[in-house]
Amino acid sequence: MKPKVISSEKLFKGAIFDLYRLSIKLANGVVANREIIKKSDSITMLVVNEDNKVLIEYEYRSPLYKTVAGFPAGLITKDEDPYVTARRELQEETGLLVDPKAFKRVGIYTLSEGFTDERSHVFIVKLTKNNYKSVNKDFDDDEYIEGWKWVSLNSAENQVHSAAANLAIKEFRNISNN
């Protein structure tokens, strides 16, 4: 017998996620209750320049109550192509307008499948002198990036702690070693 959802109740509708309570009949016949978060997918980008430096940015993350180092990232809006999201988010957060051909999706990963359906589309973006230009940043009204800089891959690895960012580093190392 496969697990089967017996009931689903929406407990909360938020701006970026919804909370549900599910009752599930498990394969062993036991009924289990689970709270899950339904959320749109996200993108995370490892951006590398011609000097092999990686872009990290500093942003206040409310759940952690602090500013952390990370890679450019954002939520995919309804029906938006992840490549479009990646290009838009990079321009909004850094002012870098990059040729769409520079974006390579290297994986789609679940982030915490025990309680959310969110997946992160991980991109590697390689900048060359001819595939980008600097334009104005265009932050969302409720967003503020405290700054960004170019660092070595090892430095980025020591500073970023999100699962998606570390998966991007792993994928970049795999590509670089082949």
Image: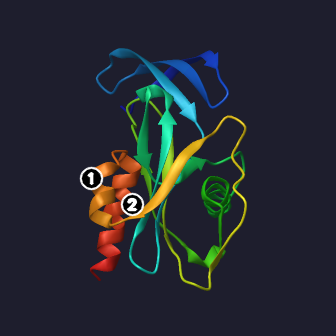
Tell me the amino acid under the disc marked 1: Asn
Q: Secondary structure at mark 2?
A: helix
**Discs 2/1, front:** 1
Q: Residues within 10 Å of mark 1 (few under 14, many from 20)?
A: few
The numbered dot on residue 63 is: none
User: Can you name the residue that lies furthest to the bottom here?
Assistant: 130
Q: Please provide percent x and percent y for residue 103.
A: 56, 71
Horizontal side, residue 178 vs residue 168: left or right: left
Front one among 57 and 171: 57
For label 1, the residue is 158
The image's colouring method is: rainbow
At horizontal 46% and vertical 59% (from top left) the residue drawn is: 149
Tell me if residue 156 comes above or below residue 15 in the rendering.
below
Q: Please provide percent x and percent y for residue 114.
A: 37, 32
Q: Please provide percent x and percent y for residue 71.
A: 46, 54
Front one among 43 and 95: 95
Tell me the amino acid under the disc marked 2: Ala
At horizontal 39% and vertical 60% (from top left) the residue drawn is: 168
Identify the image quadrant of residue 130. bottom right
For label 2, the residue is 168
Q: Residue 117, can we see it?
A: no
Q: Residue 108, can we see it?
A: yes
> Which of pointers 2 and 1 lies earlier in the amino acid sequence?
1
